[in-house]
Image (spheres, rainbow, N blue to C red):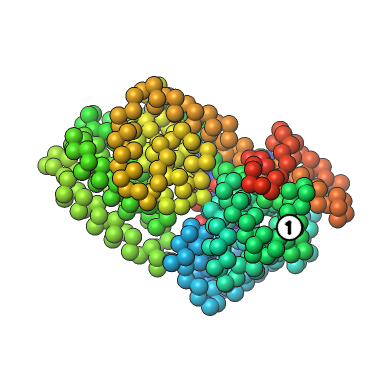
Amino acid sequence: MGRVVIVSNRVMDTTQAAQAGGVAVAISEVLQSHRGLWFGWSGAVQADVGEAPTVTPMTDGVAIATIPLTPQEHQGYYLGYANSVLWPVFHNRLDLAQFEAGFFDIYRSVNARMAASLKPLLEPDDTIWVHDYHLVPLALELRAMGVRNPIGYFLHIPFPPAQTFLAIPEHKRLARMLAAYDLVGLQTEADVANMLDYLKQGVRGRILQDGRIRAFDRVLSIGSFPVSIDPKEFVSAKPRAGLAQGGPTVRRIIGVDRLDYTKGLPPKFHAFARFLERYPDNSGNVVLTQIAPPTRESVEAYTDIRTELETLAGSINGRFGELDWVPIHYIHRSIPRSTLADIYRSARIGLVTPMRDGMNLVAKEYVAAQDPADPGVLILSRFAGAAEQLTDALIVNPYNIDEIADAIETALQMDKAERLRRNAAMLSVIQDHDTFAWSRSFLGALGRVYAKERASGGPPSPELRQRLGQLAGRTGRDEPIRSDGSRPANLTGSLE
Ligand code: GDG
């Protein structure tokens, strides 16, 4: 029986996935049920890198294969092209993009080296699933080495509007690389619309009658597959005594975001200050707890944000604080996953206001952790992918500080009946589209589009046909890939 091979920048011990949460849970489940292989960078940076990957069999039948990076590769591929070009541009921050000569070539060559290390480990009936912006070129490299297996790609971050993507000097080459996949999965229907728009404008892609796209010399399918969580992980969350500083009458607002410029942390703090200014009766009774673990500290664009946020928290606390009340409770480190669930449960408001976000799992985690008999309220940025599904949140524009301030007051005043209605509606969406449904629907769609392609270009082997049938069968329904932005179908341990 064939395997699923997952390729992502970083890999993880699949037996520890439950503690990591998020996407890692879905990936581990896929790998465990398909005798899978997980391939990626080991995290090591060293001058001497051999050809062969280090393969480690895990106790659950999964194998992990990794390679190290050289210092130059780490600089040009990871810190450079992936995190100083693709990350900012895909999040609409062209102003932060560092289009430095050489980054793209290293990015490509690392992907070529990964492909060469992975190729000897592949079996003829493997299905390959590549993740995220670090690995756009991987399929093209594998195809050039003669790999004909089905290869799917899932982008965890947003796909930007066509005009923004066109600004990347290498946009055509990236598009050709994307076209080497059989299926490209994006988080939202808005992302699908952006990508189709770009393919039409930027590289004269043509939409075929069956909804697939002809671009360059390939036919590919694109669909939205919104990433999710396992809501069961959060049902046993408990409100904890002592979590709300200042005693039982203090109502908590919770924010959990990596300290990233896309997450809208300074505007969130400004909005909280505006709320205290506009609604002074809340003085002493409301606390904003912001957990902001450090991230990518060696990337230049991240160096200022920590100082900016600490200064802002200090000035807001200095301006509004009392002897027995500190309004912003700011934690700049990672906290254990079990504590996180309890903090969500203890908070009356989940404040999720990124300027741009692929999905945002924190929004879904907050909803799932609420007491179903007395839930809190989610305030969610319209620019988080999750806003496409969680329409019963209080949706705000993160650029509008007054609107966020007013939404905080609305949430605090919201009666129980409305809180119950909104939470139940959002929880039902999350339960219907959980993390396991996400992986099944992606692999099912990949199986179908690959079978369709092979039907026109030669049949797959009997083993592969059987394998693809099994994968497709697990989705339970047969949804076509459509090209008008409508849905064809439906990982965090960080894969960074
Ligand atoms: C990318 C995309 C997309 C956070 N702080 C702590 C902690 N976390 C966990 C959260 C959540 C995860 O990290 C963050 O996931 P997000 O989805 O919110 O954001 P990104 O890290 O930017 O992820 C994003 C995602 O990929 C999946 O496709 O949704 O749009 O940018 O699970 O709970 N976990 C622990 N301690 C912390 O302090 N244990």
Question: In the rendered structure, which amino acid carries the disc numbered 1?
Answer: Arg
Q: Foreground: 390 or 458?
A: 390
Residue most toward the front?
201
x, y (%) of residue 4? 69, 48
The part of the image, by quadrant, that contains residue 205 is bottom right
Q: Which residue is mark 1?
A: 206
x, y (%) of residue 437? 62, 37
Crowding at dot 1, Cα within 10 Å, few <14 / some 14-19 / many 20+, comes out as some
Q: Foreground: 334 or 258?
A: 258
- Residue at image position (49%, 31%) is 426
Residue 375 appears in view: yes
Relative horizontal placement of residue 299, taking residue 435 as reference (left or right): left
SS for callout 1:
strand
Q: Foreground: 124 or 201?
A: 201
**Quadrant of the drawing holding the N terminus:** top right
The answer to whether residue 362 is above or below residue 47 is above
- Residue at image position (66%, 47%) is 484
The answer to whether residue 47 is above or below residue 476 is below
- Residue at image position (61%, 67%) is 171
- Residue at image position (79%, 40%) is 469
x, y (%) of residue 487? 64, 42
The part of the image, by quadrant, that contains residue 50 is bottom right
Relative horizontal placement of residue 416, taking residue 386 as reference (left or right): left
Q: Foreground: 248 or 181?
A: 181
